[in-house]
Image: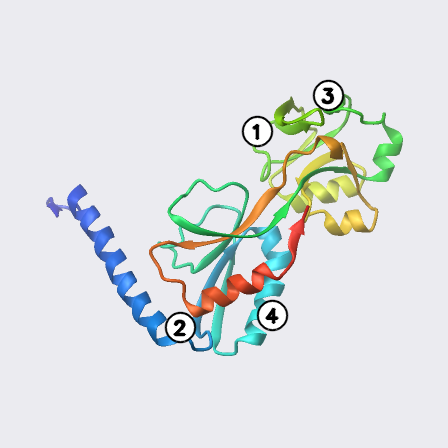
Amino acid sequence: LQRTTRSVTLTDAGARYLERARRILADVAEAEGAAQAERAVPSGRLVVAAPNVFGRLHVAPLMAAYLEKYKSVRAELTLADRLINLVEDGVDAAVRIGQLEDSSLVVRPVGATRRVLVASPQYLARHKKLQRPEDLARHVLIQCTALTPNPEWRFRTPEDSAKELRVAISPRYVTNSADAAIGHALLGGGLTMVLSYQAAEAIRSKKLRVVLQEYEPPALPIQIVFPSTRLLSAKVRAFVELAARAGWRFS
């Protein structure tokens, strides 16, 4: 410890020691719990995190089915578009969409989703037909910063799927909410790029149409992650298995 007249703080060595000690204690607790409950029905408290829209549309119904099946489990669902630290926040498992950078997590793929460019039939009827991504310069655009924080949209060329095509955009309307972007597009406000599960209902009902589909980038994986420092408990294993059968393939 470093002591001053006003505070007591950890040294670098102390912080490393504390982190390792916590991991050891967590391993011991998980090992004891797993040994006792490995063949038992899932029980205890399950904490799951997920992105806002996906969590509301798909994880919340899955949690309801999970709780109906496993009566001895108490569950908590946290919805947030920011990355949550699973260990620090006490989260057992998280649903994440896209490529992952944190290699310390165990990853279980459970689905995939496309990035789609959509607009209402009314908007498309009033404007020139889109044939190539470069034609976007002549259209009214809606940017959802939760998916594309920078003012550019990325595509793949049909001739070479490995070649990325970046198109700078000048949006008329910018929002961090996929729901708001889709709502504005439904009103004929322009073209927007969102994840296919977010607009799935509007596309099925033909209130939105997908354009430039042949230029879409590769689908993004949907994954469940959990800390590698913990043994996979019966409650988490049951949740992962249920999610794998949920049909989260929006590609």
Q: Is residue 76 placed above or below 88 in the rendered structure?
A: below
In the rendered image, residue 43, in percent from the top left (x then y), is placed at 44, 75
User: Mark 3 Cα within 10 Å, few/some/many (few <14, many 20+)?
Assistant: few
In the rendered image, residue 148, in percent from the top left (x then y), is placed at 59, 34
Work out which quarter of the rendered image holds the C terminus and state it. top right
- Identified by mark 4, the residue type is Ala
Helix, strand or loop at mark 2? loop
- Circle 2 is placed at which residue position? 38
- Identified by mark 3, the residue type is Glu
Distance CA(mark 3)–CA(mark 2): 56 Å
Q: Which mark is residue 189?
A: none
Circles 1 and 3: CB atoms closer than 8 Å:
no
**Which tag is nearer the camera, tag 1 or tag 3?**
3
- Circle 3 is placed at which residue position? 134
The residue that appears at 85% across and 39% down in the rendered structure is 121
- Circle 1 is placed at which residue position? 150
Circles 2 and 1: CB atoms closer than 8 Å:
no
User: Mark 4 Cα within 10 Å, few/some/many (few <14, many 20+)?
Assistant: few
Helix, strand or loop at mark 3? helix
**Which tag is nearer the camera, tag 3 or tag 2?**
2
The residue that appears at 56% across and 33% down in the rendered structure is 149
Distance CA(mark 2)–CA(mark 1): 46 Å
Residue 11, visible in the rendered structure: no
- Circle 4 is placed at which residue position? 65
Comes first in the chain, label 3 or label 2: 2
Colour style of the rendered protein structure: rainbow
Comes first in the chain, label 1 or label 4: 4
Residue 22, visible in the rendered structure: yes
Q: Is residue 154 placed above or below 97 in the rendered structure?
A: above
